[in-house]
Amino acid sequence: MTARTPDSARDIPEATVARLPVYLRALIGLAEDGTTTCSSEELAASAGVNSAKLRKDLSYLGSYGTRGVGYDVEYLRYQIAREIGVTQDRRVVIVGIGNLGHALANYSGFRSRGFRVVALLDADPARQAEVVAGLDVRSFDDLEAIVAEHDVSIGVIATPAVAAQDVADRMVAAGITSILNFAPTVLAVPDGVDVRKVDLSIELQILAYHEQRKSVAPGTEVVS
Amino acid sequence: MTARTPDSARDIPEATVARLPVYLRALIGLAEDGTTTCSSEELAASAGVNSAKLRKDLSYLGSYGTRGVGYDVEYLRYQIAREIGVTQDRRVVIVGIGNLGHALANYSGFRSRGFRVVALLDADPARQAEVVAGLDVRSFDDLEAIVAEHDVSIGVIATPAVAAQDVADRMVAAGITSILNFAPTVLAVPDGVDVRKVDLSIELQILAYHEQRKSVAPGTEVVS
DNA sequence: GCCGTTTTGTTCTCCCGTTCACAAACTCCT
DNA sequence: AGGAGTTTGTGAACGGGAGAACAAAACGGC
Ligand SMILES: NC(=O)c1ccc[n+]([C@@H]2O[C@H](COP(=O)([O-])OP(=O)(O)OC[C@H]3O[C@@H](n4cnc5c(N)ncnc54)[C@H](O)[C@@H]3O)[C@@H](O)[C@H]2O)c1
Ligand SMILES: NC(=O)c1ccc[n+]([C@@H]2O[C@H](COP(=O)([O-])OP(=O)(O)OC[C@H]3O[C@@H](n4cnc5c(N)ncnc54)[C@H](O)[C@@H]3O)[C@@H](O)[C@H]2O)c1
């Protein structure tokens, strides 16, 4: 607990890890507004969380604030970016350049947050004639070569669900250890490989559940 | 606890609500394979969760299984769909028909899961000449009229971050009480309005954090 | 140089969610 | 009909995260 571990924090709770990017975004916003110092209260408001939670989260990284003053925006921003590991660019490949793959490839927000899309892959030869966001769409068979050439950190799966497991297997075999999956399937991967899924239909269904509750039970859970 | 609440479950934990759509998807897959009955073990495997967790989750809905046998796939599927509230279609509007909005509008998976996109809105007059996925892109000013005409349940925000709060305010004023937000901003909404956010950059940053950990501390957290 | 004020870092408590483990309940076989 | 074998539903233990509350530390005024 009180033992000093100066160069790196040992174990940051998963819930905290998920919020660090939100704090980072809030700090970037504050910096753009010309703010150089902020209190935990202000930053928490920008990030939409409780200030006690914010302070506890930041305490896992170290003591980067000054009591009675607050946090230096630029310094804290760098510390969080370093902790997350986005101080230097990470290479990303996107597989499946359909509706969603096009949108992802054209999204500038990845680049500005430290992620560089180095290749777009698709199994359909018709797609491979295309140039999207300045990149050739290449054959899925080039995966291994591309991963070996660039130092690819993260694979993004935007193929139909039936192909997702195959694509994941190939990614893992090629040495990718982090996958972001948009296909509505559960992926099986070996230990040591991280998978995060984004399932928009699930999000809508969760909203639908609460929506139904609002209309069915108007007197049970009403707030103010 | 043992009091019978036959027609509707009272309070389903949020974590369970988030998994019900996964179970629903798994059941649909099993039904397509011709499976009529399944055990909690099988269903849990399909959904990628622990079987005890699955049983506890399902127990919040009622006792729909048969001990010694398992669950009837079709029956359970209907019960979950009813609980979530997707037995009849829900109307959705998408605001911001750029890269992402196009992909969402063209996605067939929403329709097949009980969500009907009734309108696409954009503030840019140049966009409003377009027809996307068989729908005219209409002016954002038509929002109130569209919400009133159709019975819109859910609003999807796919505009740039700077516009998101304004769009959310207009949606709330028009009577929408569930919002799915793709813009990287914290939205402020009144009580009674649900917001869920999907932030792809945050997902990548979480992966980046774990990726960094793998390479920095190769002997600390290795599994098997 | 000292005191009051501000704000952080941390401790403590509570609550939600996960998992184990087992009794109850059902089927099938003899 | 009865017993063996399954599988559900749930009580109980456990772990992690959220939030309140407070002590420690820095600043500023005098
Ligand atoms: N479009 C959306 O808004 C949206 C929303 C939610 C979920 N999704 C999911 O995202 C995925 C992609 O959706 P989409 O609308 O872009 O689909 P799409 O059909 O437009 O695109 C899929 C692409 O993947 C390619 N592909 C197929 N098999 C492949 C393989 N084995 N290897 C490499 N490429 C392969 C296809 O050639 C195609 O270009 C789907 O799983 C879908 O369910 C999409
Ligand atoms: N494209 C992606 O893959 C991706 C990934 C992650 C996050 N996002 C986020 O999703 C949002 C949309 O991304 P995009 O790439 O589609 O952007 P985009 O610029 O291509 O599209 C935005 C659209 O919103 C419209 N718009 C702007 N202000 C509006 C307003 N006030 N009311 C109605 N419409 C308005 C614009 O006319 C434009 O058509 C952004 O916030 C982005 O950060 C996108």
Image: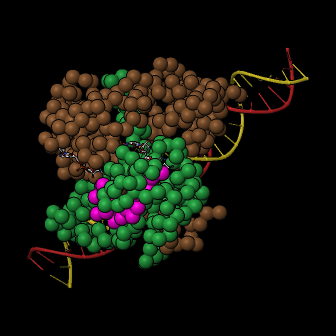
Chain colours: A green, B brown, C yellow, D red
Viewer-side residue, A178 vs A156: A156
Q: Residue at x 49, y 56 (%)?
A: A140
Q: Residue at x 64, y 37 (%)?
A: B42
Q: Residue at x 51, y 33 (%)?
A: B24
Residue A97 lies left or right of residue A195; in this view the side is left
**For residue A108: magenta?**
yes
The magenta-colored residue range is A105-123
Viewer-side residue, B37 vs B120: B120
Whether residue A193 is visible: no
Viewer-side residue, B190 vs A158: A158
Q: Looking at the picture, how far across and down is residue A196, in whole percent?
A: 46, 52
**Quadrant housing the C terminus of chain B:** bottom right
Whether residue A64 is visible: yes
Q: Looking at the picture, how far across and down is residue B210, in whole percent?
A: 47, 63
Q: Looking at the picture, how far across and down is residue D11, in whole percent?
A: 61, 35
Residue B25 lies left or right of residue A206; in this view the side is right
Q: Residue at x 71, y 28 (%)?
A: B68
Which picture quadrant has residue B165? top left
